[in-house]
Amino acid sequence: MVGFAADHLDAPGVASDPSLDINDLYLFQSPTNPNNSVFIMTVNPFNGGADFSSAGSYQFQIDNTGDAVANVTYETTFAPAAGGTQAYTVTRNGLIIGGGTTGTTTATVTNGQVQAGTYDDPFFFDLNGFNNGFAFTGDDAFAGADVSAIVLEIDSSDFNAAGSTNVGAQARTLFGVNQFDRMGRPAVNTALVSAANKDAFNLGLPANDFGTFGSDVNASITGLSNAANANALTPILLPDLLTFDTSNPSGFLNGRGLTDDVIDATLNLVSAGAVTTDGVNANDNPFRSVFPFLALPNTPVPEPSRVLFLGVAAIIGLMRRRR
């Protein structure tokens, strides 16, 4: 069973290593310095406090030329845990720009800063109401959940192309040298790619998305709304990159801010307005106004069994019954 969330447990293959399972990607203009952009990747769904993988790596990849191929890659690698923390190193296109230790300590990197550790899961959604035939009650199924996160704030000029402020970004994890998971916009693989192709999607490249998975995504959106809506949305959602104008502070679909209600926006789009809200309009814990912006972790960590409520089949079956 996989989850209709942003990207939590989106495919069978990611269950083998939750530390490399990407939950969410956020990318937004820093509220404390408009010249900077903030990248956030969360992993370890419903398992805050777990280690980052020391056998894998975590990448923010940026396309700044519009061809869906990465031009700049910020990669974080972690040493095995020692004394409850992990040392980590950050590189830009293979060159070390800094590093630190997991926890509450912010480390300096060239042209920016970074922090990695356990935080409150910033994703919010009435999943139980969704799975109960859209009988939304505004109950956030992710309230109290913790995740592991990497937060990188960097001068936007460090990854923008000359003369342009527009980029497309994805989060990517690798096990060794092999791609393990990837994510651009929320819920593309989870909700719109067929079950048979979900693992293949996670192993794919954005430049190939439209040709390889376009028919899948088009068919799913058609089933949730109509063919005209599917034809309009498919070339926007593929390739699966989070598009972002670094000079623009507005949120989703321009990047993705922590407070953006991406579920409302996504349900509204793919259902052609049939579903507009789940009643959950904000995170259960307030975000911080300064770096690293994420809310502090919860105590105690909620039961991992809550993830059993997640089921991607629900989005198609329930929305079709609503038509």
Image (cartoon, helix red, strand yellow):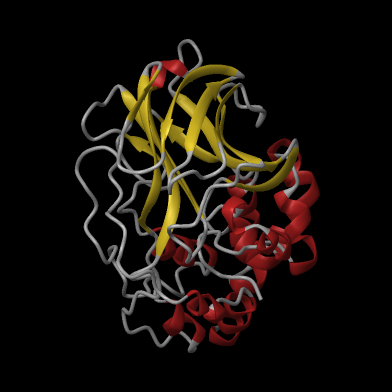
Q: Is residue 267 placed above or below 59 in the rendered structure?
A: below
Q: Pinpoint residue 77: horizontal percent, then vertical percent.
A: 57, 34
Q: Residue at x 52, y 45 (%)?
A: 81
Kindly indicate the quadrant of the structure image that contains residue 14.
Answer: bottom right
Can residue 291 be seen from the camera position used here? yes
Q: Residue at x 39, y 67 (%)?
A: 145
Residue 110 versus residue 312: which sits nearer the camera?
110
Q: Is residue 262 placed above or below 84 in the rendered structure?
A: below
Task: Determine whether, in the image, residue 196 is placed left or right of residue 73.
Answer: right
Can residue 247 be seen from the camera position used here? no
Q: Pinpoint residue 143: horizontal percent, then vertical percent.
A: 34, 71
Name the image quarter holding the C terminus: bottom right
Name the image quarter holding the N terminus: bottom right
Q: Is residue 168 placed above or below 257 in the rendered structure?
A: above
Q: Residue at x 23, y 35 (%)?
A: 31
Residue 231 versus residue 158: which sits nearer the camera?
158
Q: Residue at x 37, y 72 (%)?
A: 277
Q: Pinpoint residue 18: horizontal percent, then vertical percent.
A: 60, 58
